[in-house]
């Protein structure tokens, strides 16, 4: 239907921004356009039961001696007519309604009062009532997990059988193999260059690489000899803690292939280093 301004109820509600009314009008329009509509008496019966639901249930339950929600059809109709239930034009229309609610030849009155089997769901009165949204559950507060400690490997200890690798500490932009310093004092690289980190390698590896200076430094470790001499002087004849491996122990230490530095030097055919190792060990 439209008013004098040729506007429907839905259009007026939309102009005023009333969303619930717009939704209800839209639903009513869909009902009016439906091809199959329920019997007006069924709608009246549904509305009657819906409005008087509590009162009808109390009076019907007085006749339900077994309290199982079942009553004979005659008792049910008599009680309903006492409350003024609308009657159909054709009295046989009751038979179909009662047949849909019959269990063990008795009427299931509590289901009939709900009206779910009388008309379809879209014609229920409850579908037009405002729906109450369930209260939202409070959000769970996420507990911050403590940081997982990173698994770190223990610091790798350099084996005692490793010896310091000889490294020529000099400025190669000034001096090299073909242009060595004329005098050791001429090489002042240590004054402006950062000394590299100390690296250790197995003595057998130095022999395989023909690194003579590393072998000589390992056999005649001037720093170790100086430290031992100072420690013995301070002890005054007392006990002095020796290094993990003495000179002879380093020379006789075996590698992963169970070979001593002397065996490796002999296998390499380096007579000079063989003599050096024999004299020291």
Image: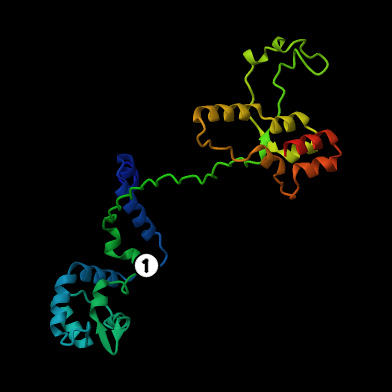
Left or right? Give the position of 64 relative to 204: left
Image location of residue 51, percent across then percent down = 19, 67
The x, y position of residue 106, in whole percent, is: 26, 87
**Residue 27 versus residue 74 in the image, above or below:** above
Identity of the residue drawn at 69% across and 37% down: 201
User: The C terminus lies in which quarter of the figure?
Assistant: top right
Furthest toward the front, the residue is 237
Q: Quadrant of residue 245?
A: top right
In the image, residue 278 above or below residue 51: above
Is residue 164 rendered to the left or right of residue 16? right
Q: Quadrant of residue 108?
A: bottom left
Task: Judge by depth and name the residue closer to the eye, 216 or 119.
Answer: 216
Judge whether residue 165 can be spotted in this image. Answer: no
Q: Residues within 10 Å of mark 1 (few under 14, many from 20)?
A: few
* Residue on which the image places disc 1: 37
Return the x and y of residue 228 as percentages of the image width and height.
58, 30
Q: In this rendered view, identify the residue nearer to me: 42 or 70.
A: 70
Horizontal side of 16 relative to 237 (left or right) equals: left
Residue lying farthest right? 269
User: Percent from the top left, x then y, of residue 49?
Assistant: 21, 71
Q: Is residue 53 left or right of residue 151?
A: left
Q: Nearer the viewer, residue 88 or 243?
A: 243
Q: Residue placed at 59% from the left, 40% from the top?
A: 244
Residue at the spot 23% in from the left edge and 79% down from the top edge? 109
Query: Is residue 59 visible in the rendered structure shown here?
Result: yes
Depth check, front residue: 124 or 157:
157
The number of discs equals 1
């Amino acid at each position: 239907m439209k008013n004098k301004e040729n506007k429907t109820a839905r259009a007026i509600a939309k102009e005023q921004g009333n969303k619930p009314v717009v939704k209800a009008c839209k639903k009513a329009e869909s009902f009016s356009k439906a091809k199959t509509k329920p019997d007006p008496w069924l709608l009246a019966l549904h509305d009657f039961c819906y409005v008087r639901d509590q009162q009808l249930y109390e009076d019907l339950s007085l006749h339900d001696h077994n309290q199982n929600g079942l009553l004979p059809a005659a008792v049910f109709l008599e009680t309903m007519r006492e409350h003024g239930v609308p009657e159909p034009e054709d009295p046989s229309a009751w038979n179909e309604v009662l047949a849909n609610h019959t269990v063990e030849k008795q009427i299931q009155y509590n289901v009939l009062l709900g009206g779910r089997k009388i008309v379809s769901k879209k014609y229920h009165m409850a579908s037009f009532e405002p729906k109450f949204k369930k209260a939202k559950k409070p959000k769970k507060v996420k507990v911050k997990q403590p940081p997982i400690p990173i698994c770190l490997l223990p610091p790798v200890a350099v084996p005692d059988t490793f010896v310091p690798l000889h490294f020529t500490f000099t400025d190669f932009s000034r001096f090299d193999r073909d242009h060595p310093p004329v005098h050791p004092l001429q090489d002042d690289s240590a004054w402006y260059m950062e000394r590299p980190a100390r690296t250790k390698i197995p003595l057998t590896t130095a022999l395989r690489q023909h690194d003579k200076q590393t072998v000589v430094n390992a056999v005649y470790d001037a720093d170790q000899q100086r430290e031992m001499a100072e420690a013995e002087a301070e002890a005054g004849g007392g006990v002095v803690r020796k290094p993990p491996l003495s000179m002879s122990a380093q020379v006789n230490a075996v590698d992963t292939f169970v070979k001593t530095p002397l065996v490796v030097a002999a296998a390499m055919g380096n007579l000079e280093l063989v003599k050096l190792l024999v004299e020291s060990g």
